[in-house]
Structures are given as C-alpha cells and as structure tokens.
Amino acid sequence: METIRIPNQATYSPVALTDVAIAAPLLSRLVLGATLPGLALQTVAIALYAGSAIQDWVERLGIRKIDFLREFGADVQHLGEMPIPKREAELRVLTERLNDSWVGERPGLADLAGAVDAHLTSYIASITGQRVETSIEIREFSLAGFLFPFATGAADILSGDVSIFRDTGPFLPHVVAHEFSHRKGYLREIEAQALAYLSMTASGEPVLVQSALCERLYRNLRALAGEDEAAYERRVRALGARAELETALLALRADLGPLTRSFAEVMKSAYDARMRLTGQNGISDYDVGFTRFLFSFETSPAARQDPPPAGRLH
C-alpha cells in the first residue's frame, strides 16, 4: 500500500507559530518597552510557518482524496431529506445504545490521539488504498480559542496545527478525529464529521464507538432545537439518558457571558459566511448536514461502501 507522509513540522513547535506571530510584537512592547525584539521573533515565526506550510502542501499533492458521492452515495451537495420522525427515532435508538453500553474510562489525550489517528488513517486507506500519515500532536492552548469561543477545537489547514479548547468528556475522541481529518486534507466540515464518525464506529474500540454515537445524538438534538437553548435542554432531559450522558450533553453548551456571547455570535456569522464561500452549506453542516449525510449513506442504494455496523441506525 502506498504511503504519503505529511511532515506537519509546525505542529512540533512548543507554541503555535501563528500565536507567536500575532502576540510577539505586543508582548515585546509590554514587557521590554520596545517592539523590535518582538518584530524579529515575529519574522522568524512567519518564516518557519510558511516553510512548514509549503512543505505540507507539496506532499499533499500526492493524496488521492475520497470521492464521497461515489463511495457513500452522498456529499455536501447531495443530501437526502431527513424527516423529523426519522430524527426522533434516531434519538431513541442512540440513547438506548449509549445507556446500555456506557464506557466511563478514557485514555489520556496523548494515547487517545495515537489511537484516533491510527483508526482514521486505516479507515481512509481502506477506501483509497493509500495511507496518509500525519502528526498526532495536539495543542491544549491557542489564541484561536479566544476567537471562536463557541468551538471545541480547531485545525489550521495550512500548518496542520490542531488545538483542543476544552475537554468535552465522551465527545473528545470524535472532536480529535474531526480535527485530524482536516489535517489529512479533508477541509469541508461534513467530510471531517463523516470521516470521524465512520472511522470511530469502525474502530472496534468501545470508547471510540461511544464518542461517535454521542456526537450523532448531540447533532440530532441540535438539528431539532436549533439555537433555542431552552428547547435543547428540554429535549436532553426528555431523552431518558443515563446521568453521565445527560450531564455530558448539557455541559456542551458554552457558558458565555453577555459580552463574550455577542462576540461569539459575530464570529459565528463570519465563519458561516466563510463556509458558504467555500462551497459548503454553512455552519449547519456540523449538525443538520452531518446527520443528513449519515442518513443518506445508510439508506443509499448506490453507495459502494457499507456503513460500519456499530454506527449504523438504518
């Protein structure tokens, strides 16, 4: 089997190079009273960042990307309608599965990253015949967390840097798999969501399967409740979910103050517009689009792939 190795050199820097480039001049001025040292450091960080990004771009040219419509019978522009009764049925099935097979323990972040990457790499390779090997480094702090307070993680598509902003409990493996999918060259959010779900449910590891099912449950709840937080909470409490699952679902709501909430809404609108400009359906692809994709795949007569049994609902 062919192997493509993406260096991702920027991910091994002790601090995100983009953070250095942004913050160095300001910190230099505040701490030293002069901007020149900060500007010099900024220049070095930008040069290292650019060098890493170019190196990764050259290697990515050899990647054979998955044709989602051909393999799964669905893609970002081809999604079957999903009636509300189907969503309600999925909520019941997912809640029952998670209640019956709950896994309370989870490996540390470093071990989790290795396991997630191994299964994601193998799943993609099973379709393309090509292993895309990338860094498994994760940052637990970056300035992006302040810019996108509504998000749980982020991936820099140029450098491959992945940041996790907060521990989301049972959802964390799926979040990591989503961001690693971006690192492997799948930039659209539906694609990253789908590859994370399919690789985790194909893994055979209970904690990874559980995370994918939790994500599908959460995204169906979001699709039904929209931005109405009170409606979301009512739906969560009406599930009949075990205490650990209910607590995890309620904890996903970012606890934002009035000022931060206003800023988050502005950034969310900007992010939604950016997604639309890149051929996506907007921020709804995370929940409405993702769940419609899985429903379309599982009911498609044309898909070449079979849905992993552990994650299949239809």
Image: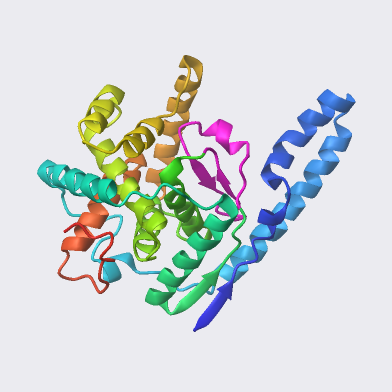
Q: Is residue 163 magenta?
A: yes
Q: Where 32 falls versus 14 (above or below)?
A: above
Q: Residue 114, image x and y in percent?
A: 55, 61
- Viewer-closest of 189 and 88: 88
- Viewer-closest of 278 and 207: 207
Q: Residue furthest bottom?
A: 1
Q: Please identify the quarter of the rendering in which residue 35 is found.
A: top right
Q: Residue 142, image x and y in percent?
A: 63, 39
- Residue at 77% from the left image edge and 29% from the top image edge: 26
- Residue at 15% from the left image edge and 42% from the top image edge: 88
Q: Is residue 184 visible?
A: no
Q: Please identify the quarter of the rendering in which residue 283 is found.
A: top left
Q: Please identify the quarter of the rendering in which residue 119 is found.
A: bottom left
In the picture, the quarter occupied by the C terminus is bottom left
Q: Where 36 falls versus 77 (above or below)?
A: above
For the image, the number of numbered tags is: 0
- Viewer-closest of 64 and 2: 2
Q: Is residue 296 left or right of residue 264?
A: left
- Viewer-closest of 257 and 264: 257
Q: Residue 23, image x and y in percent?
A: 73, 34
Magenta span of residues: 138-166
Q: Is residue 208 visible?
A: yes
Task: Say how the picture is coloured.
Answer: rainbow
- Dominant secondary structure of the magenta stretch? loop
Q: Where 239 falls versus 290 (above or below)?
A: above
- Residue at 45% from the left image edge and 24% from the top image edge: 255
- Residue at 64% from the left image edge and 61% from the top image edge: 8
Q: Is residue 109 magenta?
A: no
Q: Residue 110, image x and y in percent?
A: 59, 54
